[in-house]
Image: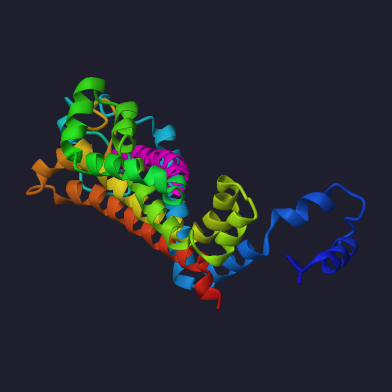
Amino acid sequence: MFFGGGLVPSYLNIQMLGMRDTIWAMILPGAISAYNVVVFRTFFKNKFTVIVSILLIAVVAFALIQPTRSGYSPIDTPNINNAEMKFLKPSAEHIFGTDHVGNEVFDAVWAGARNSIIISFVCTAINMLVGIPIGALWGFSKKMDKWMIEVYNIISNVPFLLLAMILSYILGAGMRSLIITMTCTEWIFVAYFIRTQVMIIRDREYNMASKCLGTRTWTMIVRNILPYLISVIMTYVSRQIPSLISYEVFLSYMGLGLGTTNASLGQSISLYTSYMNGYPHLFWIPVGVLAFISISLYIVGQKLADAADPRTHM
């Protein structure tokens, strides 16, 4: 047993690897847990999941790097007066063709994908960092549950589109205002989800025993409850990232997103919709990129959540 084998096997492994009396004997045994090894072993058993993961990593990496090299900006239109550069079909020289102002659709799509990915990941991180600890305390404290459920009922009944319109008017278009719009209320849905999961397991015997022994509430949450929620949290994240990408695209499509000075998949889809009849590829290319990223993120997240579920290792 190379990982988590106990004191004697761990000592023998350290001695065999020549790490005795070195700093690595303190670092490496704790760097890789047996649980993580089992999770990733289960995850990489599925060939389809591995292929989708590799493609997703390649696409996301390309979307993050390519716009920095192309320097694309929707307000830069050097070929706007050059009719020969407008509406060129996809070719080896122009991979996705050119649009109505002569700009490369390839550059526009990947610049928009980059912004959509960054916004969705930042918003997901904020929602999770705020929602998980609040939801854990909410589910564990019956006093907190009484007034938090009222806050949830109020916020959940506010129409998202109306809130987005108000915040867009107050803060203006841009990445900062879009992130605020997509996180100011979304965190409470994360908290409510975590609260429900915590309430399911908070009264189990080992938690009651810890409470009787005087264990502090936050210690019980961190050690006894949250580790068992890793799989459901991963499942929620795998659903939230694609949904937030869709929110960003929708808001940009409605003119409430990043504005005309920043590239966006929603903005590209909205702009190219009017050219569907003559140049349908202008519309379907950003839609296809959006669909691939969203579906791949969901598949990978769902498979990782399944691998992290203890029931899959029974």
Q: Is residue 148 left or right of residue 247?
A: right
Who's the residue at 49% across and 61% down the image? Answer: 203
Region rendered in magenta: 108-136
Residue 79's place in the image compared with 111, above or below, is: above
Task: Give the quadrant of the C terminus.
Answer: bottom right
Query: In the depicted view, which residue is nearer to us: 174 or 126?
Result: 126
Instruction: Tell me where residue 1 appears, x and y as whole percent.
Output: 76, 72
Q: Tell me the quarter of the picture where residue 98 sits.
A: top left
* Residue 98 visible in the current orientation: no
Image label count: 0
Q: Tell me the quarter of the picture where residue 248 sits.
A: top left
Q: Is residue 17 left or right of residue 207?
A: right
From the image, give the main secondary structure of the stretch colored magenta. helix
Name the image colouring: rainbow
Instruction: Tell me where residue 144 appears, x and y as whole percent.
Output: 40, 43
Q: Tell me the quarter of the picture where residue 82 sits.
A: top left
* Residue 21 visible in the current orientation: yes
Q: Is residue 235 left or right of residue 281?
A: right
* Residue that lies at the very extreme toward the bottom in this rendered image: 314
Membership of 184 in magenta stretch:
no
Instruction: Tell me where residue 244 appears, x and y as whole percent.
Output: 31, 45
Instruction: Tell me where residue 133 appears, x and y as whole percent.
Output: 48, 44
* Residue that lies at the very extreme toward the left in this rendered image: 277
Query: In the depicted view, which residue is nearer to us: 66 or 30?
Result: 30
Residue 42's place in the image compared with 277, above or below, is: below
* Residue that lies at the very extreme toward the front in this rendered image: 212
Query: In the depicted view, which residue is nearer to us: 92 or 20?
Result: 20
Who's the residue at 32% across and 49% down the image? Answer: 92
